Amino acid sequence: MATTYVDCNGKEWKLRLSVASGEKVKNDTGVDFATYTTLAKLQDDAILARVCFILSGEPSGEEESFIDGIDGDTKDRMEAAIWSELENFSRGRQRTVIQAARDKANQVVQQEAERIAKQISEITIDVFGKIVTNSADTSERTPSE
């Protein structure tokens, strides 16, 4: 069974994880689908794109067309397709672990995004163009170094 996603140009790509394609991904990118901790490497956009291209089974001549179809929303769809394909490829008893790993990865990414957004929201610029931060401990404004 293959999992599909649509790129920003409207082209549908099919991903298929097999023993052979999994080994090719491992040798090419270091992402080992049997070791869930290495799946964090998929946060790197270049690795995500390379893994999806390998799993698509397209000939190397199609790589430029493939890369041209990637934007932010496409990367989200690509990542979801990889997780779905990993679930499809796995034995039934492993699916719970895969789902838990995916849920934890999403939770970590969300928490990090919220932390960064909070830090950004605490930055202000005064009328003289200096960047200052609102101290979390007091209501004083202190210049950033």
Image: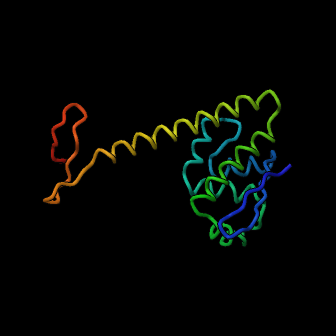
Q: Quadrant of residue 61?
A: bottom right
Q: How is the image coloured?
A: rainbow
Instruction: Indicate the position of residue 24 as horizontal and vertical percent values.
Output: 73, 51
Residue 53 falls left or right of residue 117: right
- The residue sitting at 15% across, 38% down in the picture is 140
Q: Residue furthest right?
A: 1
Q: Is residue 10 above or below residue 132?
A: below
Q: Is residue 39 above or below residue 14?
A: above
Residue 64 falls left or right of residue 117: right
Instruction: Indicate the position of residue 69 as horizontal and vertical percent values.
Output: 65, 68
Instruction: Indicate the position of residue 139 as horizontal and vertical percent values.
Output: 18, 36
Residue 27 falls left or right of residue 126: right
Camera-side residue of 13 and 129: 129
Q: Is residue 24 above or below residue 60?
A: above
Instruction: Indicate the position of residue 86 as horizontal and vertical percent values.
Output: 75, 42
Camera-side residue of 125 and 25: 125
Camera-side residue of 85 and 121: 121
Q: Residue furthest left?
A: 128
- The residue sitting at 66% across, 54% down in the picture is 77
Q: Quadrant of residue 67?
A: bottom right
Camera-side residue of 27 and 136: 136
- The residue sitting at 70% across, 41% down in the picture is 33
Residue 16 falls left or right of residue 133: right
Label count reads: 0
